Image (cartoon, rainbow, N blue to C red):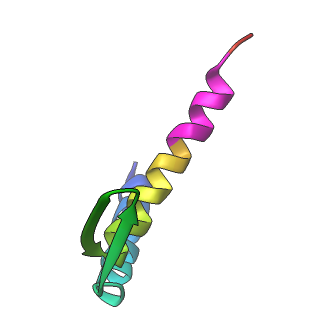
Amino acid sequence: MAWKWILIVTILMLLIVFTAQNYELVQIKFLVWSFKSSSAITIFVSLVVGFLIGLLMCIRKD
């Protein structure tokens, strides 16, 4: 059970370091929408969306 907590704390520490190093604002433009966000949040959202799309493709049964 302790190894799970060690893994969770390690991942959280890596996430904190990643966020601290990628705090710069970037402008996102898509068609008529435009907004500013930190690059860490933009990368994380892209990762989650890609993961969800991949998960949906694996779950889909024909």
In the rendered image, residue 41, in percent from the top left (x then y), is placed at 32, 67
From where the camera sits, is residue 12 visible? no
Please tell me which residue is depicted at 63% across the width and 22% down the height of the picture.
59
Q: Quadrant location of residue 60?
A: top right
Q: Nearer the viewer, residue 16 or 32?
A: 32
Query: Which residues, given as a range, are shown in magenta?
Result: 52-60
* Residue 60 appearing in the image: yes
x%, y% of residue 25?
27, 83
Q: Is residue 49 left or right of residue 25?
A: right
Q: Residue at x 54, y 49 (%)?
A: 50
Residue found at the very far front of the displayed protein: 32
The correct choice, above or below, for 25 with respect to 10 in the image is below
Where is residue 32? Give x, y as percent: 33, 57
Residue at 54% across / 46% down in the picture?
51
Residue 57 quadrant: top right
Image quarter where the C terminus lies is top right
